[in-house]
């Protein structure tokens, strides 16, 4: 298959082969491109979708973007199972193998430093939500018989909501402190907008933790023990992921259209 080169990640030589049935973006199986002791995981993508102008339009197509992101993540997940990948941004595209090699040579020292820092580590995501049920009025509340009763019920409801929020924030702060002490690094992301994420409840903690793979089981157990600890508060754990949140160079590597030829 001819076309441009889509780059998923850079890593050190793999200790095990990739899955033989693994499919990448645009249905093309990923392959390994070696250069100076590093490996770029690449596949072919068509110019009609991934050249600079069509790609700009495609990135506004949510269905296409979702399918591409899913295929991209599938390759990253497969890599994470056998090595420590340095994931590049979605839609990082170069003209040909030579362009990929130039990129790897220019960033070789950055890649090596980052891979050393991430070696043997994975990312875990932890989110804390206030459940919507916790903010609803008490079902047994009596129907107000006067204006004074109505105002009293409103004040009671407002105090209950404030108490729930305060309890959720204190819980999230304690959990983040505990997990940060168990992780090598942590990142606090902005709380998710529930209208966009479609997750139920209000997000009060959205954090990522860099954890040695060997200590992941203990980390997961700590998070699991907190689930159900506070009524009306939900804890979600995701991972293990490639360490996206701890790679600082992704925005500097060519993305959003073919890079320069060598």
Image (spheres, grey):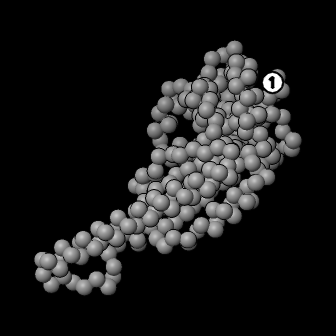
Horizontal arrangement in the rendering, residue 185 relative to residue 138 (left or right): right
Q: Position of residue 123 (x, y in %)?
A: 66, 48
- The quadrant in which residue 130 appears is bottom left
- The quadrant in which residue 242 appears is top right
**Residue 210 visible, this angle:** yes
Horizontal arrangement in the rendering, residue 187 relative to residue 262 (left or right): left
Q: Position of residue 232 (x, y in %)?
A: 46, 70
Residues 216 and 17: in front is: 216
Q: Residue at x 86, y 44 (%)?
A: 16
Query: Is 220 drawn above or below residue 152 in the view shown?
Result: above
* Residue, disc 1: 35
Horizontal arrangement in the rendering, residue 47 relative to residue 221 (left or right): left
In the structure shown, which secondary structural element does the residue marked by tag 1 occupy? strand
Q: Which of the image's four quarters has the C terminus? A: top right
Query: Is 89 drawn above or below residue 204 in the view shown?
Result: above
Q: Which residue is most to the right?
A: 15
Query: Is 231 drawn above or below residue 33 in the view shown?
Result: below
Residues 10 and 237: in front is: 237
Q: Residue at x 64, y 68 (%)?
A: 225
Q: Position of residue 97 (x, y in %)?
A: 73, 23
Q: Which residue is most to the top?
A: 262
Q: Which of the image's four quarters has the N terminus? A: top right
**Residue 48 visible, this angle:** no
Q: Residues within 10 Å of mark 1 (few under 14, many from 20)?
A: some
Q: Residue at x 65, y 51 (%)?
A: 181
Q: Residue at x 59, y 67 (%)?
A: 226
Horizontal arrangement in the rendering, residue 132 relative to residue 67 (left or right): left
Q: Position of residue 141 (x, y in %)?
A: 28, 83
């Amino acid at each position: 298959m001819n076309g441009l080169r889509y780059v998923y990640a850079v890593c050190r030589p793999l200790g095990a082969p990739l899955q033989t049935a693994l499919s990448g973006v645009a249905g093309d199986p990923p392959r390994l491109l070696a250069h100076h002791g590093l490996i770029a995981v690449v596949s072919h993508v068509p110019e009609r979708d991934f050249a600079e102008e069509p790609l700009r339009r495609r990135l506004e197509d949510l269905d296409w973007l979702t399918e591409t992101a899913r295929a991209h993540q599938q390759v990253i997940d497969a890599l994470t199972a056998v090595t420590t990948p340095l994931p590049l941004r979605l839609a990082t595209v170069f003209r040909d193998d030579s362009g990929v090699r130039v990129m790897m040579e220019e960033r070789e020292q950055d890649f090596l430093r980052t891979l050393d820092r991430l070696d043997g580590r994975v990312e875990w995501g932890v989110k804390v939500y206030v459940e919507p049920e916790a903010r609803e009025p008490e079902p047994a509340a009596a129907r107000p018989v006067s204006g004074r009763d109505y105002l009293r019920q409103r004040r009671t409801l407002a105090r209950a909501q404030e108490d729930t929020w305060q309890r959720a924030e204190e819980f999230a702060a304690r959990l983040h402190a505990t997990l940060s002490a168990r992780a090598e690094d942590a990142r606090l992301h902005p709380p998710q907008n529930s209208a966009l994420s479609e997750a139920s409840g209000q997000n009060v903690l959205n954090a990522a933790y860099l954890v040695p793979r060997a200590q992941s089981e203990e980390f997961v157990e700590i998070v699991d023990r907190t689930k159900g600890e506070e009524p009306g508060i939900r804890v979600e754990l995701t991972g293990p992921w490639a360490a996206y949140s701890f790679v600082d160079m992704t925005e500097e590597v060519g993305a959003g259209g073919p890079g320069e030829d060598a």
